[in-house]
Image (cartoon, rainbow, N blue to C red):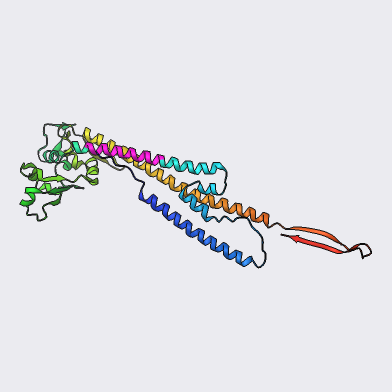
Amino acid sequence: MEKKVGRMPKFYSIFSIFLTLTAISYSQELQKDSSSKMEDTSSVVIKEQSKNIYPGKPLIMSLILPGAGQYYNKSPFWKTASFLGLEISGLLAWNHFQNEADKWKDKYKDFADQNWTLDNWVMNVTSPNDSYNYEDRYWRQFQALSKFSGTHDMHLIITGALANELNVNDGYLMVSSDSLDQHSDWILNPDYRQDIVVVRDRHFYENIGKYDQFVGGWNDARDSWYWEEKDVGDSTEIVIKTPMKKDYINWRYESNNMLSAAKYAVTLLMFNHVISGIESVWTHLNKNNNQDSQSASVQSKFNLVYDPTMKFGVSGIKFAVYF
């Protein structure tokens, strides 16, 4: 069977692109604002400054790769290592859980393809094994087991001789499994049986594990089915299973758990990008504020002006302010 490789959810890629574009726009606005402020104050004070690092750059770097903005800001190494380590751990966790989910999915789908058939379903609904009962209850006593229609349905594709018999122009016809209530002979007639297949899509694999009306399709349904009570809050619900269906449900449950864990890993990755970006901007602004406060400190100098022509050699006072 061809192996399916899990892919990162689309919303994670969209999220990353959105953050990057937002950061670029934000950094451009900051740069324009900074330029306008420098132009406004240039007529008052002209001073030589060190290289100005605007906050948009570390923000973009952190949104693309957490920890990169911290490295650019020359923050303590533990900050860079922490954000980068979380990113690597999140990616490894997502890949692991996604692969595990795919393994369980392949397992339960292969199992269903081998052990759930349309023939079984039609035979058990129309002619159940009346000699078998579970805790004094028989198959025909359960309404969900006695007809094909119910809360959900499957898609059937009709082709070949049966499609010709039904005057189908396109050569095939898709119908609901509910139609088997009136046309179970389509399956029971050996001349038509090969012309009908069930569509094994996502709904199919969900239906055969969740709903009682499809229990009859399992290979062990004829003489191994059983029922159990399930507490649903204010009432008790009867659930009908077979040993095969029980295994199938457990494997689907494991697959869904692994998918949930993979989604949590993606959520961790998104938060890591955001927090790394916010921290890089905050550190940059804090560092620039400290540099500005130091460079803006005022120093003064007081001196006497020496003049030998004066009686006391002093002609005045010299006061200077450096900023």
| Position of 256 relative to 319 (above/below) | above
Main secondary-structure element of the magenta-colored stretch: helix
Residue at the image position 22 percent from the left and 34 percent from the top: 244
Estimate the x, y position of residue 274 in percent, counting from the top left: 47, 50
Residue 314 within the segment the image draws in magenta:
no
| Position of 279 relative to 224 (above/below) | below
- Magenta residues (range): 92-111
Image-quadrant location for residue 186:
top left
Asked whether 4 or 232 is in front, the reply is 4
Residue at the image position 37 percent from the left and 38 percent from the top: 96
Estimate the x, y position of residue 306 in percent, counting from the top left: 88, 61
- Quadrant where the N terminus sits is top left
Left or right: residue 28 versus residue 213 is right
Image-quadrant location for residue 262:
top left
Residue at the image position 12 percent from the left and 41 percent from the top: 122
Estimate the x, y position of residue 298 in percent, counting from the top left: 72, 58
Asked whether 301 or 166 is in front, the reply is 301
Asked whether 109 or 246 is in front, the reply is 109
